[in-house]
Image (tube, rainbow, N blue to C red):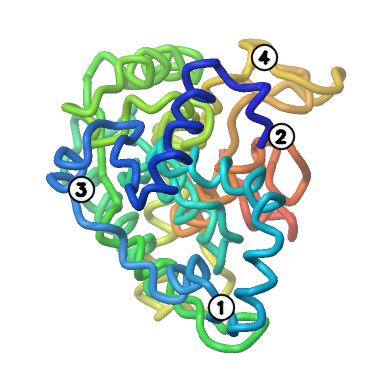
Amino acid sequence: MDLHMMHPDLAAQAQAGAAQQAQGVVPGASMHGTQQQQQQQPSQIPHGGYHAALQPSHQPSQQQQQQQQQQQHHQHQYRLPILLLRVLGHRPPAAPVGRLGHVLHTMQQTGFHAWGFVIYRGCAYADEAAWQRFLMHMRQEVHNALAATPRLGGGGVDTSGRQLAPYLEWTVVEDPSLEGASKDTVRRHFAAWAAARTPQRDGPGADGPFIESHVPRFMYCVYIDQRCLRTLAAFDDWLRLDRNGPMQYLACIIIDKNCPPHGEGDAGMMPVDGCERYYTGWMYAHVGSLPELYNTLGHQRLISGPNNYARPPRIYPGHLYGASVPP
């Protein structure tokens, strides 16, 4: 981190932090308030193996300590960026661990712990039973995804989903005026909601400077329209068969807040809601894929590649095998 590229106030703050550390004082300021205020915030997320990755791997020997003392004037230039991270309320960055590691990593970097897509209801206002059944299956599929503990490449199991489960926020926006609404209409509603974020409404850290550009909760939303609701019957039947036979997808729509109204990418494609560009700004996704999609969209755009984006009527992740949402 180059202190010369920082705001002068931040650089001065970091220099002051270095002087305090030399006197045995640990800086107590943070991005989101005083140290006393931070103690009133929710306890740190249970990192498990991820937290261990943030700790020193060994203690230096006596010989290493002597070498460090001899090179103290070289270390000073590296200590300042670490102090700046402490001043701003951050820990030094660590490599994400697990299939949902980027979500944990972002929590560490921003201090904002709530996660999960905001859900817009665009259907079934006259059939509450069907809507509640859809939400029940949606919650269960997400729960199943978070409870899974696949093997990690280097050994051990991936517990990132279980660590994140307590912090999942289910926010459902219901407004009869949204029944049958276009994706652009939902996008505008969501953009206004995201811009109005506050710690009081969304939780501690929501007013951080990088939240709206790095946290998927404020970048993408989920929309459920009548076409999504029509996938419920086949999904119900598949569950009654104990998930035997071809997989059935319970569809929802992921909407990109930052996509222009007429899409992006190559033109001349088959029109989808009037959009002839490759990237329509939205896609269908199976509800059980939402946790991993949330993780991916924290560091990649939806349009970033065919593994991420399924052009409608294809549905993620079955689009790789030709799966589509029925008309």
Q: Are marks 4 and 1 in contact (CB under 8 Å)?
A: no
Camera sees residue 69: yes
Q: Secondary structure at mark 2?
A: helix
Query: In this orientation, which residue lies closer to the viewer: 321 or 114?
Result: 114
Q: Residue 174, labelled with which disc?
A: none
Query: In this orientation, which residue lies closer to the viewer: 210 or 164?
Result: 210
Per the image, the residue denoted by label 2 is 303
**10 Å crowding of disc 2: few (<14), some (14-19), many (20+):** many
Q: Which sits earlier in the primary sequence, circle 3 or circle 2?
A: 3
Q: Nearer the viewer, mark 3 or mark 2?
A: 2
Q: Residue 132, labelled with which disc?
A: 3
Query: In this orientation, which residue lies closer to the viewer: 186 or 259?
Result: 259
Q: Amino acid at mark 2?
A: Ile
Query: What residue sits 44% from the left and 53% below the top?
Result: 287
Q: Is residue 128 left or right of residue 10?
A: left
Q: Are marks 2 and 1 in contact (CB under 8 Å)?
A: no
Per the image, the residue denoted by label 4 is 274
Spatial CA distance of label 2 from label 1 is: 38 Å
Per the image, the residue denoted by label 1 is 57
Q: Nearer the viewer, mark 4 or mark 1?
A: 1
Query: What residue sits 49% from the left and 23% below the top?
Result: 12
Q: Secondary structure at mark 4?
A: loop
Spatial CA distance of label 4 from label 1 is: 55 Å
Q: Position of residue 309 (x, y in %)?
A: 69, 42
Query: What residue sits 66% from the left and 43% below the top?
Result: 77
Q: Amino acid at mark 1?
A: Ser
